[in-house]
Amino acid sequence: MIKHSLIVVILFALFSCSSLKRIEKSCEKNPFQELDSTQRANQNLRYTIQTPKSWKKGRTSDGDSYVLDGKFIDSLGYFSTKASVYVSRNAIRETCNDKAFWIEDYLDYYIDFINRWYSDTTFKYLLLKGKHKFYQAIYIINYSNKTPDSRLFKYTTFLFFKENIGYSLTYVSEPKHYETYLPEVEKMINSFSILE
């Protein structure tokens, strides 16, 4: 009976250690929460942003959206506004909270996430590092993508990271409208603040 109990304790200890190693490896590979679309849509984003009056706030399955009110290209089409900004939040998983993570970890996660959408081609992007008036450093990722109906769009994503939570703010526009609305988007980005 004592031998049987001892074997059970040893097996439990081995199983516990192997579980910790799996968590450790998974935190190194991807420390961010993987939420489904319902969880992402319902999460509290906890930020403030100032938008021009011509921009209207909405919700998507990934977070908040801001679009130019009444500036539709095609009300029935895909990406039907001339300019949009999408705000998304990605938090570190609770099992990984005892480690230190930095904006570079969020950058790696975000690039890997976007890369999944480019499985048949190479994801090409321009990476810039910038400063924000409220935060030490942010990353700016510029890239282009075609919609299923072959329309080309320019994307600029601004990555913020504070207290184990990453935020991405993505500006999307057709190339011919990109420069027109960029000053308004820059004001929005400069006003962005993560709530405590």
Image (tube, rainbow, N blue to C red):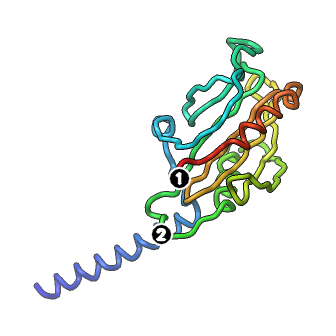
Q: Farthest residue in the bottom direction?
A: 3
Of the numbered discs 2 and 1, the one sitting upstream in the chain is: 1
Q: CA distance from mark 2 to mark 1?
A: 13 Å
Instruction: Specify the quadrant of the image occupied by residue 104.
Output: bottom right
Q: Amino acid at mark 2?
A: Asp
Contact, mark 2 vs mark 1 (Cβ under 8 Å): no
According to the picture, the residue beneath numbered tag 1 turns out to be 91
Question: Mark 1 belongs to which amino acid?
Answer: Ala
Whether 166 is drawn above or below 50: the answer is below
| Residue 107 image-quadrant placement | bottom right
Residue, x 59% and y 40% (percent of image)? 48
SS assignment at label 1: strand
**Residue found 86% across the figure and 27% down from its top:** 180
Q: What residue is rendered at 59% in x and 65% in y?
A: 101
Disc 2: CA contacts within 10 A as few (<14), some (14-19) or many (>=20): few
- Is 7 displayed left or right of 154 in the figure? left
Residue at left offset 49%, top offset 64%: 96
Q: What x and y, as percent, mark residue 23?
A: 46, 67
Question: Mark 1, residues whose alpha carbon is within 10 Å: few (<14), some, or many (≥20)?
Answer: some
11 or 37: nearer the eye? 37
Residue 85 on image: x %, y %: 69, 33
x%, y% of residue 41? 50, 35
